[in-house]
Amino acid sequence: METLRFLEASRVLELQREFSTPFYVYDEDTLLTRAREVLSFPNPYGLVGRYAMKALPTAEILRIVHGAGLYIDASSGFEAERALRAGIPADKIQITAQELPRNLEALVQQGVWFNACSERQLEHYGELFPGTEVSIRVNPGLGSGHSNRTNVGGPSASFGIWHEQLGEVERTAARHDLTIGRMHTHIGSGSDPDKWVVCAKMSLEIAARLENVHTLSLGGGFKVGRMANEDSADLVAIGQKIVPEIEAFAREHGRELELEVEPGTYVAANCGALVCTITDLVSTRASDGYDFIKIDAGMSEIIRPSMYGGQHPIVVVPADETPRETGDYLVAGHCCESGDVLTPAPGDPEALETRTLTEPRVGDAVVIEGAGAYCAGMAAKNYNAFPECAEVLLRSDGSAQLIRKRQTLDQMLQNEV
Ligand SMILES: Cc1ncc(COP(=O)(O)O)c(C=O)c1O
């Protein structure tokens, strides 16, 4: 059975009473520890650690990780604007976006950095800011993710400039007197650490062909075990494999590359949990079916299980002290959607897999762990008109602070005309 990570059962029940469920709860100490680990990534000539804010973009979270020393990776003009409004200085934000931001000119004028992810984006940037330095995102030809849906490198991915098109890129840059001083690769989320290292080496080979590159960002993608049986990437071990390559690059090309990494999952995944309440129990066991636990949250708060069979620890926290057995259950979300199941088989959202859990009763709390990254920031928001839920931060001093209020129905409807 999975266990609670940073909460204790009594605290869960206390929070359940104080903030009505569902709500996310984040742990400041875990965030700070992860940020420190990212900033200790081995490097021979300097490191910038960015936090990929798409993972969890709430303003207070951005302020905490930035306060710990991380810069910001924004994946749209809107995200960059959101980081600015949270108080992050413009020159600590870099945009790496699939869609060219409509407000790019204004953002760059304020000091935000831009990482061109296609030739068209580079062309556009060159027209706006000729004679400046720019970064390009390259697809190095290899991808790796915990599922095909999180793989963003190789021939089947549309992310970045294909590595065989550097000639065209250099001609575009020359037309606008742009200097390609920074290069970026990011091959997927939950990457295989060995492939991540191979990709780093491939990226160095590409950087060798771009003679003005002084900074190499190797993106994020570090694996994080959410379940007890899943492994997490060892940043020091990974970094140590890359340091000699960067040193060899310096000897061969006379350039001491500054290194960047920009994880989202690594920083946020295990800093958060979703706290819910059991609303119903149903069973189809009489016909070889299952015992289901229904909770007051689902794909409208946490979509990773339905989207790619993502696994999250689930812990039933009894509301009373009566002795309980354990049993095997499926956990169903509150959306009217058969795919809204929190217990799919690993990597297969179509298949179901029961979990051994404490015998549940209506009113018990359920804690879904590993819900810091790609949960509040990436869910089927407002499906079935469920409001965006509240976010609570457990401060290092032990206090619990509301950092985002629950959305109201009026707010959900305010733009309807
Ligand atoms: C450009 C870029 N950088 C960083 C990340 C963060 O990846 P992860 O959360 O796997 O560390 C992503 C995720 O999609 C990304 O697209």
Image (cartoon, rainbow, N blue to C red):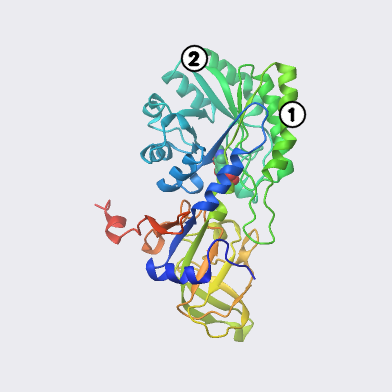
- Across and down, in percent, residue 19 comes to 38, 65
Disc 1 crowd, CA 10 A, few/some/many (<14, 14-19, 20+): some
Which amino acid does the dot numbered 1 rest on?
Answer: Glu
- Does mark 1 have its CB less than 8 Å from ligand 1? no
| Farthest front residue in view | 397
- Across and down, in percent, residue 127 comes to 44, 19
- Which of the numbered marks, if any, corresponds to residue 176? 2
| Front in this rendered view, residue 58 or 168 | 58
Q: Is residue 254 visible?
A: yes
Which residue is located at x 75 percent, y 24 percent? 248
Which amino acid does the dot numbered 2 rest on?
Answer: His
Up/down of 206 relative to 279, above or below: above
| Front in this rendered view, residue 281 or 272 | 272
Task: Name the quadrant where ligand 1 sits.
Answer: top right
Which residue is located at x 52 percent, y 67 percent? 367
Q: Mark 2 vs mark 1: give the one in front.
A: 1
| Front in this rendered view, residue 290 or 61 | 61
Which residue is located at x 70 percent, y 35 percent? 199
Element at label 1 = helix
Q: Identify the residue under disc 1.
A: 245
How far apart are labels 2 and 1 at the CA level? 32 Å
